[in-house]
Image (spheres, rainbow, N blue to C red):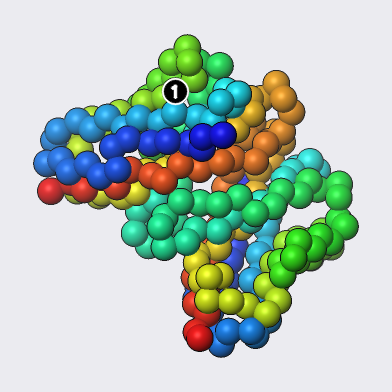
Amino acid sequence: AQKVTQAQTEISVVEKEDVTLDCVYETRDTTYYLFWYKQPPSGELVFLIRRNSFDEQNEISGRYSWNFQKSTSSFNFTITASQVVDSAVYFCALSEYSSASKIIFGSGTRLSIRP
Amino acid sequence: EAGVTQSPTHLIKTRGQQATLRCSPISGHTSVYWYQQALGLGLQFLLWYDEGEERNRGNFPPRFSGRQFPNYSSELNVNALELEDSALYLCASSLGRLAGGPNEQFFGPGTRLTVL
């Protein structure tokens, strides 16, 4: 069975601090995909990144970086030098290749950046 | 390029009524997904349509149904509404299953359904 756990329900940091959002997943498939989505107060989910299970290379995109470690089944997301506009709910998600595009989302982490 | 659109933005119904929600995918996308985001329950997968057929279904009762039209737009129908159906319903689209995947899904702004 596939499962995504985001243990941090809420995080609050002061602007310019670095913050890491944790994501731990469970799957029996050898081929799977991991995603991060951002949901700002407007409600619309914004796609951030997709990684497949064969690519463990970490990725950096501006102030965002992702650390994928299969050994610990984790796909953590770090925001460097956080800004108020980063305030949102962030969802980690998993899709097993065998489950035909069904995406299972974690419960989300609400990130608040204080000025 | 236009994103995923959903209508209506808000919908208010009473218990027992039927609700119809609509979604238009990004041009070129053949897959449409429906999710329910109820308060405190996160995002729950409802339905996946691709090339006009239902490909996968989440753990929801049969009164949640839908369809996909030849132009790949989709409708979600909820019959015999219950109070707990009140939620934000999100539609997403992606390239179809034949494009390999799972592909990243792009979400619409959602329809907020309130059942009184």
Q: Position of residue B12 (x, y in %)?
A: 17, 43
Corner quadrant of residue A62: bottom right
Task: Tell me: residue B74, above or below residue B112.
Answer: above
Q: Position of residue B72 (x, y in %)?
A: 49, 20
Task: Tell me: residue B91, above or below residue B31.
Answer: below
Q: How many marks?
A: 1
Residue at image mark 1: B73
Corner quadrant of residue A20: bottom right
Corner quadrant of residue B19: top left
In the depicted view, which residue is nearer to us: B9 or B99? B9
Query: Which residue is painted at 13% across and 35% down in the image?
Result: B16
Q: Position of residue B70 (x, y in %)?
A: 47, 12
Query: Which residue is painted at 65% across and 54% down in the image?
Result: A48
Q: Position of residue A115 (x, y in %)?
A: 50, 86
Task: Tell me: residue A108, above or below residue B72.
Answer: below
Is residue B69 rendered to the left or right of residue B86? right
Is residue A83 rendered to the left or right of residue B90? right
Is residue A7 rendered to the left or right of residue A26? left
Residue A73 makes an appearance in the image: yes
Amino acid type for the residue under numbered disc 1: Ser
Is residue A4 rendered to the left or right of residue B112? right
Categorize mark 1 by other alpha carbons within 10 Å: few (<14), some (14-19), many (20+). Answer: many
Query: Which residue is painted at 50% across and 43% down in the image?
Result: B107
